[in-house]
Structure formats: structure tokens, C-alpha cells
Image (cartoon, coloured by chain):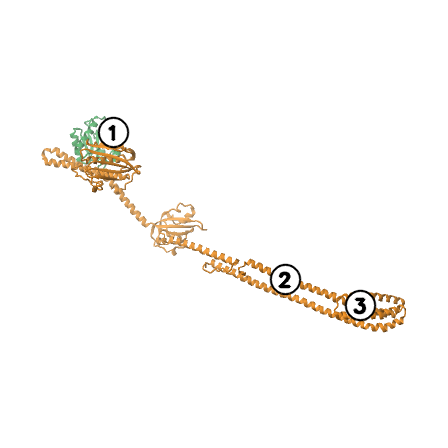
Chain colours: A orange, B green
């Protein structure tokens, strides 16, 4: 129960107890002292005064006797007169002292003696002194002398004896009283000594208790605290009581637990960071303001081929090739940074040259950031070996160059085709023409037919070349995007195609305005309409153009009542140089639909066909309402 | 041609094309003498030679070795003596850039050579008709 009291209340209790104890001892001492003083007073009053009184009485009696004797020596009237007066006065004094004396405290034994003495004295005074005085006054010196010899002298002996014994008794009594008081003082002294001893013992006991309850647990707490400070977090902290020490212990335990928790969190975070650092692809090194390497992660080790232990404490300049004098920018990269405090190089990735352990230089990306918050400036350098990337970049740029040259060749291809292919073709055409005109009479019918076929094939080849050129121009040759009234564009195309009278072209829905390249849009309608006209197999051809909004796109349709297309050809017809009719029957290059598809897709739309063979076909295509020309890749263009 | 005594300068590297032009001119009865040179450099040399007679018109191919048509035009149109001679481009190229470059250099016309000879004759006929009625400085 005491254990659960707080030390404060325990201390208060102990101090209170001690105070009460000391007060009790003090009171006891005081009481004893006052008793002793009283005793001394009693000794004085009861013994010293009576002793003096007895002595006085004795001396007075003796004086009376002497006065009688002296009066008898010189019995002159003057002497007798003075002596008898003195005797009377002495007797009076004696009586008064005696009365005082018997009122004092007397032991029964004393009382008996006193009464004996009183009797003896009265006889002595009455029969001796007073009688002598009477005789003297009567001038009977002889008689007085006789009284002196016969009465006074013998009567004095018992008086003297009893007074002696009374004195002796008094002295004995004083001695006894004295002894008693001395004993009492001794008792008090002993009591005080004992109380001092008890107080000392109590003090010792209390200090032991205090040390047990306060200092030893405190030392324990100190030991535990030191242990915690030294990093021993696993030690047992037992809360033994609920007092302040217990609370301190509890607080220490909580602190330790919280510390352990914090440390665990820090360790986890550190482990996390270190795992992150260790598994980072980029090399990370921390460097102090003098350029001394502090940490070096595994990726950095891999990059530079150094072990971390080899580099810790080394200057970071070791990792950079010693520069030529004129390009000494990395010799003191970090010092330079420190001088120019806000260096633009900081925090930004720079491409620099690193130096491996084996002395080979390699390109790397380097970014340096400053860490704030610690006393010293620290820098973290992030490094990435970019040799492979550089290699890839080189390959890529080489490839790009190749591609560019290929593209250039492709551009030239159009020119080559149009000039270098068409020139000889034209020459063949011209020569064939001249042959058939100049030597007309020399050719028979078959020869003339061959010449006609030759010229027509020259034309077909020329058309094919033109088709290729047109196709290759889409997406490559850019026209300005302008706002087009499609109604007007379609009307112009119809006028250009001048369809035969048996074919009617109707626009069924009002056509919208779009923003596009005029030539391309024209090409879409021109090819679709000319196909519809060209392949028309019915006596009354009907071609309808429709348009509807579909989402954020326009959906256009060109329908005809022509021969129709079998579903298996739906994909094929949009491929370059694919035709469904023999070229001799219907002259076609097979470029038209491929061209239309390329244009539509360039604008982000799509094209498809729906058809019932024998009844007609409908070509659908979509164009975005807000035109945005997709940059066709060069590859696709090829 | 309005002026019949001045030569027509043909700058053309292809033999059949030269034959085509010669034949077409003959067919449409153009009597002017024809001076044929095979590339731009030869043509420039001819034109800058004081002894040679200045042509009334230059028929110019673009794609030629040594000095092509555009380079030839750059020289001629910067020459105060020569820049007023009308130049008609006769070429296979339908490249927009060639057309733009040619007209930037002040050509009088740009004709794509048709594959069909008959059509070519018609082209030559048009050129002759135009330069017969057009005034010249």
C-alpha cells in the first residue's frame, strides 16, 4: 500500500512523523526539566531554609546564653540593661523563626524531633534564660549566677543535642533530595541521548528507505536511459510502482517505445531509400562541398566499375577525365559551382564525359542537386551511363539520315518518273506516230493494228505514271487549307466530268462547308463520280450524293445503280493498281480509289463500300467537321 | 512567228524531243531557223557571244545535264541584254516547284510535253499562234 503512495506524500509523511517524534522528545525533556527545577526549588525551600532557620535558632539560643554569661561577667546596670533587652529581642526573633520553621515541610521524623526540641528549648528559655533575666533585673547577681550554673548550663545540653540531630536530619534529607534530583537529571539526560540515538537510527532508516524507494530506482532509470542512449532498446523496463519513479519509468518506457518506433520508421524509410538507391538504374553519389564522395550506390559502382569502398573519401574529380587545359570545365566542377552559387548547371542534366576505373572515358548524363538542411552543403550527383543511348542515338541519327536520303530519293522519284520515265515513253509514242504516218503505205492492216496498240499502251503507261505521281503527291505536296463550299466543289466536278445524258447526278442533301485542301477534296468526288459514270451498265444511270452529320464528322455517300461489287472485293478495290474490269474494256489505272482512300484517311476519316451486285454500290466516307490534316508518315507515303 | 528571220533557240538534251520539236515546227510551217543547244551552259555561251544572232524565242527544257533550265533562267534573267527574250518552258515535269521557280524567273509560258505527238503538235501550234500575234519589244 505504501508502495503505491507517491514519494511526495511519503516524504511528507516521514517529515511529519519525524517532527512529531522530535516534538514529543522535546516535550518530554521540557517536562523533565521543569520537574527537576521544581525539585530543586523544593530542596531549597523545604531543606535549605529550614536548615538555616535551625542554625539561626541555635545561634540565637547560644547568643542568649552568652549574653547572660557576659552580663554576669560585668554586672553593671548598663550591661544588664542592654543584655536583657537583647535577650528579649532575640527570644522574640527566635519565636518568629520557629513559627516559620514549623510551617515548612517536615518529615514525620523531623516533626518528632522538632517537638522534642521545642520542649527542651522552652524549658531552657523559661527555666534558664528568662529566670536569669528576671534575676539580673532584680540585681540578684548571685541568683543569676546560680541559674546560669544550675539551669542554663545543663538545660542547654538537650537543646543542643536535639538541634544537632535536627540539623543532621536536615542535612541527610538534603543529601537524599539531592541524590534524587541528580537521578532525575540523569534520567532526562539518558532519555535525551536515547532519543538522539533513535532519531539518528530513524534518519538512517529513512535514508535507506529513500535510497531504496528513490535513489535506487533513479539509478536504475539512469542506467536504462544510458542504455537507451547507447542504443540498447531491447532491455526490460519494468514499472514496479505507481509513484513518481514509476511514472518516470513509464515515461521512459513510452519514450523508449516511441524512440524504437521512430527508429523503426526511420530504419524502414532508410531501408526503403537504400533499396531504392541500390536498385536505381541511375548512379547516385553524395558529395560534400569539398567534392569528397560520401556515398556511392551500386548503379554508380556498375557505371564506373569502382567499389563503393574504393571511392568513399576520394575526390569526385577522380571520376572525370583530366581535361585539356582549354576545356578545364570539370576539373573543379563543384568548386566552380560553389563560386558561382546559382550555377545554371545545377539541377539540370548535362551531358559530360565520365572516367571508368580502367581509364576509359564514356558519355554520361550528370545532374547535380544541392541538399539543404544539414550544416554543411551536400550535393547529390545523379549519373547515367549513356554510352548505349549514345550508340543508339548515333544509329538512330544514321538511320534518320538514311531515311531522309531515302525520302529525298522518293521525292526525286516523282521527278524521275515524270521526266526520266516519261521522256522515253514520249519518244516511243512520237516515233510510233511518225512510223505509222510516214510509212502508212508500207503497213498492212495487222501492222497498223499493232502500231495502234503500241500507241495505246504508251498512253496507258503514261496514265499509270500520272496516277503514281498523283498518289505520291497526296500528303507530300501541301496545299493551303481553305474554307470550301462542298456544294460548289461537287457542282464544278460534275461540270468537269460532263456526264453523258443517260446519267443523272443528284445532290440529295445540302452539302456543308468544310476546311480542307481544295484539290484533294475535288479529287475525292472526281474519282468516285467518274468511277460511277465509267462503270455504269444501266440505260438510265442514277448517281446520288448524300451527306449527314455523324458525331463530329460528316458522313458522305455516293450511290449508283451500276453493276455493284461483290463483297469479297470490298477491301481489294481500295488497293493501288487494283481493277475489277480488264483494262482493254474499261481504261483504268487502278489508282483512283486508292487515292481517295489516302486522302480521306489523311483527313482522319474512313472510307468503305456497301453494294448489292447487279443493283448498285454506295461508297461512304467521313470527313471531320473540323479538319485537321494528319501528317502521314513518310513510310506510309512510300 | 511574227519575226521570221530570227532563229528559235531550242535548249534540249533529248534527241527524240529535238526531232519532235523540229518535226512539229515543220508541220505547222514555221520557217524560222532552229538553233539547237544541248544544255544551259552552251545556250548561255551562245547568247552571250556577240557574233551569234539573238533568238526571237527560247524553248527551254528544264532537266538537262551540266546546267539545267532553272540555272539557265537565273543567268539569262539577270542579263540586261537577254532578259527580254521570251522563254517558253517545254518540260516533262509537272512539279509545282518547277512551275513556281520558272514563273518566279519570268518565263513567258510553261508547257508540259504531252506523250501524244499529235497533242504536241497542237501545243507548238498554240505557241506559234501566240507569238505571231503578240507584240515584242
Tag 3 residue: A57
Within the image, what quadrant is residue A211 found in? bottom right
Q: Nearer the viewer, mark 1 or mark 2?
A: 2
Q: Nearer the viewer, mark 1 or mark 3?
A: 3
Mark 3 surroundings within 10 Å by alpha-carbon count, few (fewer than 14), some (14 through 19), many (20 or more):
many
Quarter the N terminus of chain A occupies: bottom right
Q: Are marks 3 and 2 in contact (CB under 8 Å)?
A: no
Residue B110 seen by the camera = no
Q: Are marks 1 and 2 in contact (CB under 8 Å)?
A: no
Number of numbered discs present?
A: 3
Mark 2 surroundings within 10 Å by alpha-carbon count, few (fewer than 14), some (14 through 19), many (20 or more):
few
Quarter the C terminus of chain A occupies: top left
Residue A260 seen by the camera = yes
Tag 2 residue: A24
Give me the residue at 73% from left, 66% from top.
A43
Find the distance from the CA under tag 1 to the CA under tag 2. Answer: 147 Å
- Disc assigned to residue A555: none
Where residue A594 appears, as percent x and y from the top left, is: 23, 39
Q: Are marks 1 and 3 in contact (CB under 8 Å)?
A: no
Give me the residue at 51% from left, 57% from top.
A247
Tag 1 residue: B84
Within the image, what quadrant is residue A615 found in? top left
Within the image, what quadrant is residue A155 found in? bottom right
Circle 2 marks a residue in which chain?
A
**Dot 3 and dot 2 within a common chain:** yes
Circle 3 marks a residue in which chain?
A
Q: Secondary structure at mark 1?
A: loop
Between B32 and A480, the one lying in front of the other is: A480
Give me the residue at 44% from left, 55% from top.
A261
Between A602 and A443, the one lying in front of the other is: A602
Where residue A188 appears, as percent x and y from the top left, is: 66, 65
Amino acid at each position: 500500500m505504501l508502495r503505491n503512495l507517491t514519494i511526495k506524500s511519503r516524504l511528507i509523511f516521514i517529515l511529519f512523523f519525524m517532527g512529531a517524534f522530535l516534538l514529543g522528545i522535546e516535550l518530554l525533556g521540557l517536562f523533565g526539566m521543569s520537574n527537576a527545577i521544581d525539585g530543586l526549588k523544593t530542596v531549597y525551600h523545604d531543606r535549605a531554609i529550614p536548615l538555616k532557620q535551625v542554625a539561626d535558632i541555635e545561634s540565637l539560643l547560644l547568643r542568649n546564653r552568652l549574653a547572660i554569661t557576659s552580663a554576669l561577667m560585668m554586672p553593671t546596670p548598663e550591661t544588664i540593661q542592654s543584655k536583657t533587652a537583647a535577650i528579649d529581642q532575640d527570644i522574640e526573633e527566635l519565636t518568629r523563626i520557629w513559627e516559620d520553621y514549623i510551617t515548612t515541610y517536615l518529615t514525620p521524623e523531623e516533626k518528632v524531633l522538632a517537638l522534642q526540641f521545642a520542649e527542651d528549648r522552652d524549658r531552657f528559655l523559661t527555666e534558664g534564660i528568662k529566670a536569669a533575666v528576671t534575676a539580673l533585673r532584680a540585681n540578684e547577681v548571685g541568683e543569676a549566677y546560680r541559674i546560669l550554673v544550675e539551669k542554663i548550663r545543663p538545660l542547654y545540653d538537650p537543646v543542643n543535642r536535639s538541634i544537632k540531630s535536627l540539623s543532621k536530619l536536615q542535612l541527610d534529607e538534603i543529601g537524599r533530595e539531592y541524590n534524587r534530583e541528580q537521578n532525575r537529571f540523569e534520567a532526562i539526560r539518558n532519555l535525551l541521548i536515547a532519543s538522539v540515538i533513535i532519531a539518528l537510527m530513524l534518519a538512517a532508516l529513512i535514508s535507506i528507505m529513500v535510497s531504496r524507494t528513490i535513489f535506487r530506482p533513479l539509478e536504475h532509470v539512469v542506467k536504462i536511459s544510458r542504455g537507451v542512449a547507447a542504443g540498447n532498446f531491447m532491455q526490460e523496463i519494468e514499472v514496479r510502482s505507481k509513484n513518481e519513479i514509476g511514472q518516470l519509468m513509464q515515461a521512459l518506457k513510452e519514450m523508449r517505445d516511441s524512440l524504437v518506433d521512430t527508429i523503426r520508421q526511420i530504419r524502414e524509410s532508410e531501408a526503403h531509400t537504400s533499396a531504392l538507391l541500390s536498385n536505381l538504374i541511375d548512379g547516385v553519389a553524395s558529395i560534400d562541398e569539398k567534392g569528397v564522395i560520401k556515398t556511392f550506390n551500386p548503379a554508380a559502382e556498375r557505371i564506373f566499375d569502382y567499389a563503393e569502398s574504393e571511392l568513399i573519401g576520394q575526390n569526385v574529380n577522380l571520376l572525370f577525365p583530366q581535361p585539356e587545359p582549354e576545356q578545364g570545365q570539370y576539373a573543379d566542377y563543384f568548386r566552380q559551382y560553389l563560386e558561382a552559387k546559382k550555377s545554371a548547371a545545377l539541377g539540370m542534366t548535362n551531358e559530360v564525359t565520365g572516367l571508368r576505373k580502367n581509364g576509359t572515358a564514356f558519355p554520361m548524363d550528370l545532374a547535380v542537386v544541392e541538399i539543404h538542411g544539414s550544416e554543411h552543403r551536400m550535393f547529390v550527383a545523379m549519373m547515367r551511363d549513356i554510352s548505349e543511348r549514345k550508340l543508339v542515338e548515333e544509329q538512330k541519327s544514321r538511320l534518320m539520315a538514311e531515311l531522309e536520303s531515302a525520302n529525298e530519293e522518293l521525292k526525286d522519284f516523282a521527278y524521275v518518273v515524270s521526266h526520266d520515265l516519261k521522256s522515253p515513253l514520249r519518244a516511243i509514242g512520237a516515233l510510233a506516230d511518225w512510223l505509222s504516218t510516214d510509212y502508212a503505205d508500207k503497213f498492212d492492216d495487222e501492222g497498223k493494228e499493232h502500231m495502234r496498240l503500241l500507241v495505246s499502251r504508251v498512253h496507258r503507261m503514261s496514265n499509270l505514271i500520272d496516277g503514281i505521281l498523283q498518289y505520291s503527291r497526296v500528303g507530300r505536296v501541301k496545299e493551303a487549307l481553305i474554307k470550301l463550299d462542298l456544294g460548289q466543289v461537287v457542282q464544278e466536278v460534275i461540270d468537269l466530268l460532263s456526264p453523258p445524258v443517260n446519267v443523272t447526278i443528284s445532290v440529295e442533301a445540302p452539302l456543308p462547308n468544310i476546311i480542307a485542301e481544295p484539290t484533294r477534296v475535288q479529287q475525292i468526288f472526281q474519282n468516285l463520280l467518274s468511277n460511277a459514270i465509267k462503270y455504269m451498265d444501266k440505260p438510265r444511270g442514277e448517281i446520288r450524293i448524300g451527306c449527314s452529320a455523324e458525331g463530329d464528322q460528316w458522313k458522305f455517300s455516293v450511290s449508283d445503280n451500276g453493276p455493284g461489287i461483290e463483297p469479297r472485293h470490298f477491301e481489294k478495290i481500295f488497293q493501288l493498281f487494283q481493277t475489277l474490269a480488264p483494262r482493254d474494256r474499261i481504261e483504268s489505272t487502278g489508282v483512283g480509289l486508292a487515292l481517295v482512300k489516302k486522302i480521306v484517311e489523311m483527313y482522319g476519316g474512313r472510307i468503305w463500300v456497301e453494294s448489292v451486285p447487279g443493283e448498285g454500290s454506295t461508297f461512304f466516307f467521313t470527313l471531320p467537321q473540323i479538319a485537321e490534316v494528319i501528317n502521314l508518315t513518310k513510310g506510309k507515303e512510300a | 512567228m511574227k519575226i521570221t528571220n530570227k532563229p528559235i533557240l531550242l535548249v534540249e538534251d533529248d534527241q527524240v524531243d529535238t526531232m519532235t520539236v523540229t518535226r512539229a515546227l515543220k508541220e505547222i510551217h514555221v520557217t524560222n531557223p532552229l538553233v539547237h543547244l544541248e544544255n544551259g551552259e552552251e545556250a548561255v555561251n551562245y547568247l552571250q557571244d556577240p557574233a551569234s544572232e539573238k533568238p526571237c524565242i527560247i524553248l527551254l527544257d528544264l532537266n538537262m545535264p551540266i546546267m539545267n533550265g532553272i540555272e539557265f533562267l537565273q543567268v539569262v534573267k539577270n542579263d540586261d541584254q537577254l532578259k527580254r527574250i521570251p522563254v517558253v518552258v517545254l518540260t516533262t515535269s509537272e512539279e509545282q516547284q518547277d512551275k513556281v521557280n520558272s514563273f518566279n524567273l519570268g518565263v513567258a509560258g510553261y508547257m508540259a510535253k504531252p506523250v501524244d505527238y499529235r497533242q504536241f503538235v497542237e501545243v507548238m501550234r498554240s505557241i506559234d499562234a501566240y507569238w505571231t500575234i503578240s507584240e515584242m519589244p
